[in-house]
Image: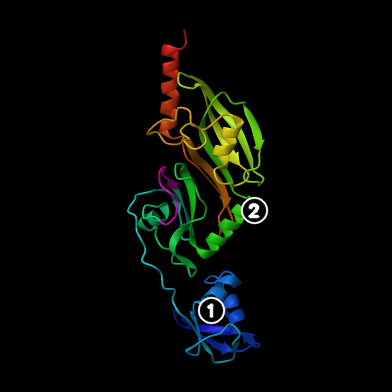
Amino acid sequence: MNFCFMQSNNFKVKKTVNVQRIFDFVFVQFKPVFPSRSSVKKAFKSKRIYLNNHLAQSGNWMVEGDTVHIKPLILDPIKVFPLDLNIIYEDAFMALVNKPAGIVVSGNFYKTLQNALFHNLSISLESDALEIPRPVHRLDKMTAGLLMVAKTRRAQKYLGLQLEMQKIDKTYIALVKGSLLSSGEIISPINGLKSQTLFKTLKTVKSASYKTLSLVELHPKTGRTHQLRIHMSNLGYPIIGDNMYDSYKVLKGKGLFLFASRIIFDHPIYKNSLSFELPIPNKFIQLINREQKRWEKFCDQ
């Protein structure tokens, strides 16, 4: 079947190539709007599809001259959280933001990164544009750093697929207690699920508060909740500031010393490889320098 646009949400069948159900017609012809069969099913269930000005059933058959009307999706009012974000990259399909620590990515709250995206990013003009930009993955509330955002359904689907297939290379910087080996691998299940983390020590310094501190790179090969925090704690090198998995001498007001510093992925539309890296936050450097000086002053006798 061929069709032509009559209005922004009205479509008329110009020529019948073969008999086709309206469900299959909508799924094939409007894939950017309805990327999966379940999304088409949901549109019929929510009474958004009309055939010749009558509410359509998914089993209705299409003939030449039929008109399909797609009712616009009625959205809840957008809650805009006017928090200025550091935008690392943005195009018509996706964006990359530097998430600040202390804010949740999404949830039934007003002050979320999700609600701040509308304040910071432009809405895509692509045919499959999302009503508002949406985070593709999560970072813990107290973790700062690089976060991918989708602006279209195709980008959302393809970036999500890369995550599912473990094709996205993510690197975190952490400051941990203790003198960690130069490099290694942690394979330890979390909630019964396989979990894998690679680590590499960048620097180890003496500390008056913790005896030694290690600045490390962490590469999660799986994506379990709190994976890096759990793995480092179980290994005996808890992350500084982790009040959930380490109860000893949690620094007040300094937050968690875990930062999503680098990400490598394929662009969801152009398919070229993209790599972004942020510098180590000042609070990491400041704490390392402070602890070194305190060790030299009070402990190195």
- Residue 107: x and y in percent read 44, 55
Q: Which residue is mark 1?
A: 44
The residues bearing labels 1 and 2 have C-alpha atoms spaced at a distance of 31 Å
When the figure is inspected, residue 295 is found, relative to residue 301, above or below; the finding is below
Label 2: which secondary element: loop
Q: Which amino acid type is marked by label 2?
A: Met
Name the residue at the left extreme. 82
When the figure is inspected, residue 36 is found, relative to residue 6, above or below; the finding is above
Label 1: which secondary element: helix
Residue at image coords 42%, 55%:
114
The stretch of residues the image draws in magenta is 98-108
Instruction: Classify residue 74 as left or right of residue 56.
Output: left
Dividing the picture into quarters, in which one does residue 122 lie? bottom left
Residue at image coords 50%, 41%:
260
Q: Which residue is mark 2?
A: 165
- Residue 73: x and y in percent read 44, 73
When the figure is inspected, residue 288 is found, relative to residue 172, above or below; the finding is above
